[in-house]
Image (spheres, rainbow, N blue to C red):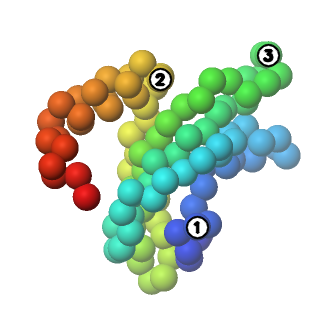
Amino acid sequence: MATDIDELTVDYMEDGQLVSKQLDKVVLSKGAWSTIIFRYQDWNRTKEEFGPDKYSIRRFQKRNGEYQYKSKFNISSAIQARKIIAALESWIPEEEES
């Protein structure tokens, strides 16, 4: 288990092969409950290459000094990501940004 938020990752190894590769992450909130959005790629065994970018928003709870994974929402495509962005931009007035 990770004890520091910087240690949290979606990198995943299976039988010595990296099957989920983290490309980037942004910490959206810190504290007892932390939220992070990850950009990553999954290994395509058939093509023997990493696939398209994917995105995942994950929640972690810090208990006894360690982060525990609690939930996630996977954004299935760039199209879905753009729709989420458009919806949020239409709901949040610019003057509220800080």
Position of residue 91 in the picture relative to residue 31 (left or right): left
Position in image of residue 21 (x %, y %): 69, 42
Residue receiving disc 2: 78
**1 or 2: tag closer to the N-terminus:** 1
Position in image of residue 84 (x %, y %): 31, 30
The residue most toward the bottom is: 64
Residue receiving disc 1: 6
The residue under the point 65% across, 34% down is 41
- Label 3: few (<14), some (14–19) or many (≥20) C-alpha neighbours in 10 Å: few
Work out which quarter of the rendered image holds the N terminus and state it. bottom right
The residue under the point 23% across, 52% down is 97
Height in image: 70 above or below 33? above
Gap between marks 1 and 2 measured at Cα: 25 Å
Element marked by disc 2? helix
The residue under the point 15% across, 49% down is 95
Gap between marks 3 and 1 measured at Cα: 31 Å
Residue receiving disc 3: 47
**2 vs 3, front mark:** 2
Residue 62 in sight in this render: yes
